[in-house]
Every structure is written in C-alpha cells, then in structure tokens.
Amino acid sequence: MSSRIAKSISITAITAALAACSSVPLDQPGTGTAGTGAGADGTTTGVIMDPFNPQSPLAQERSVYFEFDSYVVPEQYRRVVEMHASYLSRNTQQNVRIEGHADARGGSEYNLALGQRRSDAVARMMSLMGVNSAQIETVSFGKERPKALGNTEADYAENRRADISYQR
C-alpha cells in the first residue's frame, strides 16, 4: 500500500512541477497576447482605441467583406464588428456611418439594394451588441465606389464590403 501512496505522491509532484514550469503570466512579452489586453468582456486595454488614430485597430480594421450576392456577415468578421460595437457602446456620443458596397457585376439598382442590405446587416449586428441605433447611419454606394478597379475575382471580392466610417 505504501508504494501506491508514494507513486501517487510522485505523480502529483511531477504534475505540479510541470504546471509551474509552463505557467507564464499572459501580460508578459513573448506570450502572444502582450499589448492586446483583451478582457473577458471583449474590451481591450493597453491598446489605443481611437477611431481617428491611424495606429488604432478601430482605424485599421473598418471593413466587413461579404461573399458574392450575400449580405450575411461572415463569422470571420464578427470580431471586427464586436470591436467597433464595444467602442461605440462605451462612447455614446460617437456616431458611425456604415457604407455598403457591391462589386461591378449586376445592375445599378440591384447593387444599391445589396449594398444597403450589407450596411443594414452590420448595423443590426452592432445594435444586437448594445450600440444605440441612433449612433448608426446606413447608406449604400452599390458599385459606384469600388476599392479595387480591376475585374478579377480578387478585385470583386475587395469591393463586396461594408465600411465603418466614424463621424466627427
């Protein structure tokens, strides 16, 4: 019986030692999260969160891209919408205009309607995340303001978007 107890104690000691060796505080450099300060509620600290500062993620990540002929916000852009929604819900004096766009394929009227549905989809998601709808304006430019001027699939993909534009 004593050998079982000794074996159990040895395993526990080894496990504890390994756990202690692998523990690194998340706010230390080299952990992959340094500077993000991501909190459990999705807010960030230690990062410049100013939509008018070019170094801020709010200024750098303003576009939500869509699949062809779709206005469903892709899961991969949920984090972008959450980041802006978090900022807007904490800064209730700040307003945004969400500008919907479409690629060059299709008629002008159809693309204006599709761009509007895209901007409305992002606005609706922000509202569900706590942003006051009075802070959000939606508009569509359809295919009239392309980001990419070519006619390749990559160019079309770049133009299927909704841009979040902060108002001064």
Image (cartoon, rainbow, N blue to C red):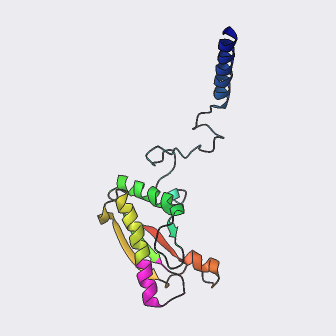
In the displayed structure, 20 sits above or below 102; it is: above
Spot occupied by residue 146 in the image (x, y as percentages of width and height)? 54, 81
Spot occupied by residue 97 in the image (x, y as percentages of width and height)? 39, 70
Residue in the foreground of this view, choosing between 59 and 79? 79
In the displayed structure, 61 sits above or below 22; it is: below
Q: Quadrant of residue 35?
A: top right
Residue 162 in sight: yes
Residue in the foreground of this view, choosing between 145 and 50? 145
Residues in magenta, as a range: 101-116
Quadrant of the image for the N terminus? top right
In the displayed structure, 22 sits above or below 162; it is: above
From the viewer's perspective, tell me whether residue 18 is left or right of residue 93.
right
Report if residue 102 lies within the magenta region. yes
Q: Residue at x 51, y 73 (%)?
A: 161
Spot occupied by residue 26 in the image (x, y as percentages of width and height)? 58, 37
In the displayed structure, 108 sits above or below 67; it is: below
From the viewer's perspective, tell me whether residue 105 is left or right of residue 125.
right
**Residue sticking out furthest to the top:** 2
Q: Residue at x 54, y 87 (%)?
A: 105
Q: Residue at x 66, y 19 (%)?
A: 13
**Residue sticking out furthest to the front:** 1
Q: Residue at x 50, y 82 (%)?
A: 145
Quadrant of the image for the C terminus? bottom left
**Residue sticking out furthest to the left:** 134
Spot occupied by residue 52 in the image (x, y as percentages of width and height)? 47, 61
Residue 61 in sight: no
